[in-house]
Amino acid sequence: MKRILVLGCTGSIGTSTLEIVRNMGDDFQICGLTAHSNKERLSALTTEFNCKSVLTSENNPDAIKNLLEETKPDIVVNGIAGAAGLLPSKTVLDAGINLALANKETVVMAWPLIKQLAEKNNAAVIPVDSEHSAIFNLVHQVNQKNVDKIIITASGGPFRTFTREQLENVTVEQALNHPTWKMGRKITIDSASLANKGLEVIEAVRLFDISADDIQVVVHPQSLIHSLVRTKDGMLYAQISDPDMKHPIFSALTWPENKETYLSPFDLFDSTMTFFRPRINDFPMLGYAFEAAKKSKSYTIAYNAANEEAVAAFLDKKTGFTAIPRIVRSVLDKDWTYEPRSFDDVFEQDKKARKLAQEMI
Ligand code: NDP
Ligand code: MG
């Protein structure tokens, strides 16, 4: 019986995780839960799972540490949205506990520090992001030394076929209407602008220690193939399932075992798979991410922070959709050559980028 603690249990990732535990009661037990603003839901879930819980925010940094000490989980799922998920990841790894990581910002902002901490405390970081879960599993199967290229699939989002002119006038409601995935608001906007794919390119460069030049993004609107690995002998290996985050979460929770799932297997019959090149000129956030991944240092922190501010402004209807890449571009054009040596350094760069983005907004 694995003891699971869920950070961000009221969100999309958190909800899928709890759904798995409801169906796999003999294998998993929820020992702790956190949320941020949704007190009522947290309280209902705490009663349902008969566990400890706490409301967390940047203002109570010890809350998660204390909860970990009280509940002693075997694995923690980090489903917190945005940069707010970074310190919780650090806290989990500080305690030497395995981390099932959906919060991609942790990797984008501070991977070198996170990796060092995980190694020092002998804790595993298991990716939950569907593309990275796919690559993680594929790389283990084909062996890292044989990997030549990583091919990350993208749904293309709701505006895949929109012209540049149409993109100028899209509304928040249209951007929130994702064709294949049901997710939180921020990541849904990122999927529409391809910033999510951009963050995922950076995430892949770091998690799999591969050059950005060896990563390719392919638009695959059905979201059935979650990513592919090309081996040096020219073979392509793909991971396929229905687009449901419960698959990668299940895989992370059961890792390193390959347990039988209760989720329905994918049926190849009557399915169609198509592939397109990403329109990088019309969706500049993807190109900027490749640039930030190559420059590294504080560029990826700036990319993430400026995008978070721009997306929040778009959701508040203070800016248009195409202002998002313009804001991020202007922030990336500043000097981000400082190499962060501590988490404090990371947050300093994050703050600087947010301030610049706010000035632009
Ligand atoms: P949601 O917005 O649905 O949920 C976010 C969760 O984080 C909620 O439980 C929320 O609590 C909590 N939270 C929000 N702000 C804070 C804060 N300042 N401090 C602590 N907790 C906070 O997000 P998603 O589930 O969509 O995404 C979570 C992470 O997973 C993101 O990094 C995203 O990129 C990644 N991810 C998500 C996927 C998906 O399918 N949703 C797919 C792949 C990756 P409350 O509700 O109480 O406010
Ligand atoms: Mg993803």
Image: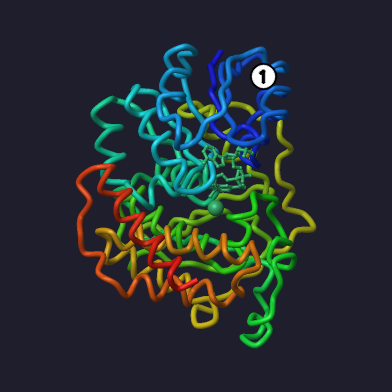
Q: Please name the residue that numbered disc 1 is placed on.
A: 46
Q: Residues within 10 Å of mark 1 (few under 14, many from 20)?
A: some
Question: Between residues 261 and 294, which one lies in front from this camera angle?
Answer: 294
Considering every residue shown, the one lying at the far bottom of the view is 165
Residue type, mark 1 in image: Thr
Identity of the residue drawn at 28% across and 59% down: 298
Q: Is residue 72 above or below residue 148?
A: above
Identity of the residue drawn at 72% across and 28% down: 40
With 83 as the anchor, is 205 left or right in this view?
left
Q: Is residue 136 above or below residue 160?
A: above
**x, y percentage for residue 7?**
54, 31
Identity of the residue drawn at 53% across and 27% down: 254
Q: Is residue 71 above or below residue 218?
A: above
Quadrant containing the N terminus is: top right
**x, y percentage for residue 290?**
38, 68
Secondary structure under tag 1 reads helix
Tell me if I can see residue 265 in this picture. Answer: yes
Question: Between residues 25 and 177, which one lies in front from this camera angle?
Answer: 177
Q: Is residue 100 above or below residue 342?
A: above
